Image (tube, grey):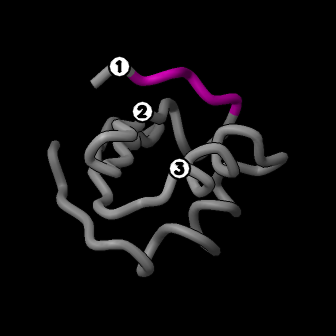
Amino acid sequence: MRREQLDSTAIASAGYDVGTGVLELEFTSGEVYRYFAVPPSIHRGLVSAASAGRFFRERVRDVYPAEHVR
């Protein structure tokens, strides 16, 4: 999945597959997680948020099922 760089101290890049609803995030720590059943509006909100880290904590983490990739 192609990811775009984010201007964030917490999240390095984000990718989204509209067909499957999978949001893939690479954190600045190097860890990569996939979140499932994520609506397109959440992806758009994340990449346009003033603080991607805060948006993630409030709207993604502990809301959508996740898989640790690396």
Give the residue type that dot 2 points to.
Answer: Gly
Where is residue 41? Give x, y as percent: 62, 54
* Magenta-span inclusion, residue 70: no
Badge 2 marks a residue whose secondary structure is: strand
Q: Could you give the CA–CA distance between mark 3 and mark 1, rounded to whole angstroms?
A: 16 Å
Residue found 35% across the figure and 19% down from its top: 2
Between disc 2 and disc 3, whose residue precedes?
Answer: 2
* Magenta-span inclusion, residue 5: yes
Q: Residue furthest bottom?
A: 62
Looking at the rendered image, the quarter that the C terminus falls into is top left
Between disc 3 and disc 1, whose residue precedes?
Answer: 1
- In this figure, which residue is indicated by the disc labeled 2? 15
Q: Is residue 12 left or right of residue 31?
A: right
Q: Residue furthest front?
A: 19
Between disc 1 and disc 2, whose residue precedes?
Answer: 1
Quarter of the rendering containing residue 9: top right
Q: Is residue 40 left or right of residue 33?
A: right
Give the residue type that dot 3 points to.
Answer: Pro
Proximity of marks 1 and 2: CB atoms separated by less than 8 Å:
yes
- From the viewer's perspective, is residue 25 above or below residue 61? above
Q: Residues within 10 Å of mark 2 (few under 14, many from 20)?
A: some
Q: Could you give the CA–CA distance between mark 1 and mark 2, rounded to whole angstroms?
A: 6 Å
Badge 3 marks a residue whose secondary structure is: helix
- In this figure, which residue is indicated by the disc labeled 3? 40
Residue found 25% across the figure and 65% down from its top: 66
Which stretch is magenta? 3-7
Badge 1 marks a residue whose secondary structure is: loop
| Number of the label disc, if any, that sits on residue 2 | 1
Q: Could you give the CA–CA distance between mark 2 and mark 3, rounded to whole angstroms?
A: 11 Å
Q: Is residue 40 left or right of residue 24?
A: right
